[in-house]
Image: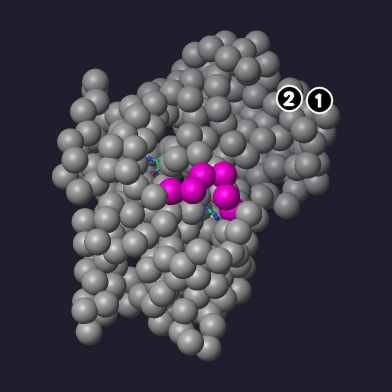
């Protein structure tokens, strides 16, 4: 059984930032990542452009040079991968953590699909991109319904329904429309989401206004069928022809994983995890949360820009504890 001072679960930007801070302080840390380096970013849409400018995605002040002010997915993959390799961070890839338990001697036992480890401290930085918010609508399990969007080429000359009105849904609708898809947006609220990137919002609103992209507002899907979908609209039920559906209605952290470890979650339906805002330590002593996982169901609260500081907060605390 391998022992480490610190095990960091999740090798996203924030897990990597924690690994880097640990290394600087001489803390023996291992990052365990269930996929590739920055696996969530790897799974983002192929042409995705961040809403943050590159310097706001930097960790530890390491310059992030991008062609445009706001970098694209492939540039971010390059940046974070180089941080891992150039700093020789200890990271195990394609190894999923399945459980974390606390022993009587106060250390943690971390089980993965490959090995068992012990550690004095654990950081959970597992993000939210692995579990989509499903619609619980009849036919959602049809193969034509996807919760992740990758490449617009696939949808060319097809009747595509995009459900949602956030950044992901709007980006997908515009890209697919421009590659020749016949796009219909189905939006639960009365308008395009207020947090949509300010330089993209007029584009989608104008495409809807001119009729290039169809949109139903205050609408929900009643049923997905093989060649159509049934929508509830303010004007009544409508059936539209359909080949593919992108249900881009957000994602959520793995709450049952947190609960199993013993992290308390709020009972207001938001599932906010309990942690100390100065140290990021949870109600489980020596177990910390970092990154976007901290926001519960409010996944817009934390992003790379404002959660990269978690790394220093956590590692300063662990470092102090080690000296005492
Ligand atoms: C489309 C999109 C665009 C975004 N644009 C921006 C932006 O412009 N600016 C910004 O600041 N933020 C943006 N965000 C938010 C932010 O980029 C991401 O949420 C970011 O990836 C958060 O970093 P993280 O390290 O907290 O989590 P993640 O990057 O999600 O990393 C978590 C990692 O944990 C791994 N993992 C999960 N469970 C386990 C397990 N059991 N065992 C081992 N590993 C596990 C996952 O594979 C993943 O690699 C965007 C998010 C999305 C979805």
- Residue 57: percent from the left, percent from the top? 26, 42
Question: Which quadrant does the C terminus fall into?
Answer: bottom left
Residues at marks 2 and 1 touching, judged by CB atoms closer than 8 Å: yes
Dot 2 surroundings within 10 Å: few (below 14), some, or many (20 or more)?
Answer: many
Q: Nearer the viewer, residue 324 or 70?
A: 324
Q: How is the image coloured?
A: one colour
> Left or right of 188: which side holds 134?
right
Could you tell me if residue 132 is visible in this image?
Answer: yes
User: Residue placed at 55% from the left, 19% from the top?
Assistant: 152
What residue is disc 2 on?
Answer: 242
* Residue bearing the label numbered 1: 227
Question: x, y (%) of residue 251?
Answer: 54, 50
Distance Cα–Cα, label 2 vs label 1: 5 Å
Question: x%, y% of residue 75?
Answer: 33, 27
Horizontally, is 109 left or right of 312 in the view?
Answer: right
| Residue for point 77% across, 33% down | 143
Q: Position of residue 303 (x, y in %)?
A: 35, 51
Boundaries of the magenta span: 91-96
């Amino acid at each position: 059984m391998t022992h480490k001072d610190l095990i960091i679960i999740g090798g996203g930007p924030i897990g990597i930032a924690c690994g880097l801070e640990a290394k600087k302080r001489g803390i023996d840390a291992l990052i365990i990542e269930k996929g590739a380096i920055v696996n969530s970013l790897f799974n983002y849409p192929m042409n995705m452009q961040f809403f943050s400018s590159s310097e706001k995605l930097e960790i530890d002040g390491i310059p992030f040079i991008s062609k445009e002010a706001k970098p694209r997915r492939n540039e971010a993959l390059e940046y974070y991968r180089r941080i891992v390799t150039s700093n020789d961070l200890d990271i195990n890839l394609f190894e999923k953590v399945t459980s974390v338990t606390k022993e009587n001697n106060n250390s943690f036992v971390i089980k993965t699909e490959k090995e068992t480890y012990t550690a004095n401290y654990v950081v959970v930085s597992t993000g939210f991109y692995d579990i989509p918010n499903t619609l619980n609508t009849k036919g959602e399990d049809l193969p034509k319904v996807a919760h992740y969007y990758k490449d617009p080429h696939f949808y060319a000359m097809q009747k595509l329904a995009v459900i949602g009105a956030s950044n992901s849904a709007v980006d997908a609708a515009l890209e697919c429309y421009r590659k020749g898809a016949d796009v219909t947006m189905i939006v639960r609220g009365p308008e395009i989401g207020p947090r949509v990137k300010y330089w993209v919002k007029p584009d989608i609103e104008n495409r809807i206004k001119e009729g290039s992209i169809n949109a139903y507002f205050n609408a929900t899907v009643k049923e997905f069928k093989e060649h159509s979908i049934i929508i509830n609209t303010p004007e009544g039920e409508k059936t539209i022809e359909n080949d593919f559906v992108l249900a881009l209605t957000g994602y959520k952290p793995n709450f049952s994983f947190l609960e199993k470890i013993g992290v308390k979650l709020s009972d207001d339906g938001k599932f906010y995890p309990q942690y100390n805002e100065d140290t990021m330590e949870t109600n489980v002593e020596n177990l910390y949360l970092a990154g976007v996982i901290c926001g519960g169901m409010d996944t817009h609260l934390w992003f790379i820009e404002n959660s990269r500081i978690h790394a220093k907060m956590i590692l300063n605390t662990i470092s102090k504890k080690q000296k005492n």
